[in-house]
Structure formats: structure tokens, C-alpha cells
Amino acid sequence: MKTLYLIRHAKSDWSDGKLSDFERGLKKRGFKDLKTIGSYMSLQNIKPDLILSSPALRAQITADYLADKIGYSGKVHYMNELYNTRPETLLNTLTLQEDNYNKIFIVGHNPALTELANFLVKDNIGKFPTLGVLKLHLNIQSWNNISEQCGNVDFFIYPKQFRYYMPKQIRTTLPRDNISKD
């Protein structure tokens, strides 16, 4: 069995109209959300064998922060194929991975992440919110065997779930000035 985490980048910053889509960083809220989701993932002891990320700045920041927060010691692989792409390209990228990787993170963008998720599971995922994390158990032994509806959802989390109720374990890992109800 393989495990796949589909992760959409954190909330991006549109304030500088001179920047291209590729160059956009994160809003203040994006950084705050990263701390929350990163703390959750760390507390759950989530550790991938491989992290693949879009090279767009907002995805790089997301992948790097999460890798650091969960203590990932491997290299984050930034792949041009994961930026502004189709779900088929994400699928093809997965089929090319070595089978010694049992848990993979893909940090990317919509609509490709939502479409890939809906291809892999029977349930309709809807739309990935920013910094949504979908954990899938895939009923395959080799990445090359990935196919339609081969996955089951383990969890689907996103920052707004923690807006009004934040478990104490997460709350205590965040600096006090980053906790608010806005």
C-alpha cells in the first residue's frame, strides 16, 4: 500500500501586480495557516519519504515550511511539471516514482489537485481550499499501478477547520501573537 498526500499551497499574495503568477509569495494569513497545519502534521508524526513540489514561489514556501516543521531530512524536489499543469501530468509524475518511496507529498495547485483527487477516490472532494491536505491510502504496491478509484481518503484537513476550535496540542506549539480568531 502507498500513501499520497495532496497539498495545495498556502494563501497567496496578490498585492504586487508587477509579479507574475509564478513569483507570487504568501499573504500573512498564508504564513499563519502554515504554522497551524504544520503543527498538526508534526503532532501526527507525518513523515513522507519524498516531497515533490511545484517551483512556483508560493508552493516552494509551503513545501519548505512543512518539510522543516515535520523534520523531513530529504531533498524537496521542485518540478516544473507540477506548475500550471493537468491532473494527467501529476498522475504520470507519480507513476515514475521509485517504489521504495511509500509516502509521497505533492505540493501544487488547483484545479489539477482537485481533479487528481477525484480521479483517485470514489467520493467527490469538491474544491481544495488553500493549504488543504488530503491523505490518501492507495491500494497499490507500485506507483506504476496507480489507477482510477484506487484510493481511500484517510483525512482531509484545511486551515478553516481550526479557525474556531484549535486543539490545545496545536495551540501550545504556536507563538502567542499568531493565535487569533480572525
Image (tube, rainbow, N blue to C red):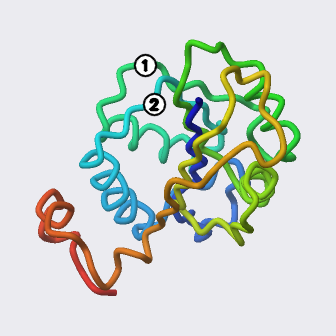
Q: Residue at label 2?
A: 48
From the viewer's side, name the closer residue of 111 and 150. Answer: 150
Examine the rendered structure and indicate whether residue 111 appears above or below residue 52. below
In which quadrant of the rendered view does residue 175 lie? bottom left
From the viewer's side, name the closer residue of 143 and 42. Answer: 143
Q: What residue type is labelled 2?
A: Pro
Q: What residue type is labelled 1?
A: Gly
Q: Position of residue 181 (x, y in %)?
A: 28, 86
Q: Position of residue 140 (x, y in %)?
A: 69, 29
Q: Please rate how many residues cluster around mark 1, counting C-alpha atoms within 10 Å: few if below 14, some from 14 to 19, many from 20.
A: few
Q: Where is residue 44 in the image (x, y as percent from the top left)?
A: 29, 47
Quadrant in the picture for the C terminus: bottom left
Please name the residue shown 40% across and 67% down the image: 28
Please name the residue shown 68% across and 56% down the image: 19
Give the Cα separation between the discs numbered 1 and 2: 9 Å
User: Element type at marker 2?
Assistant: loop
Q: Position of residue 157 (x, y in %)?
A: 47, 64
Q: Are marks 1 and 2 in contact (CB under 8 Å)?
A: yes
The mark closer to the camera, 1 or 2, is 2
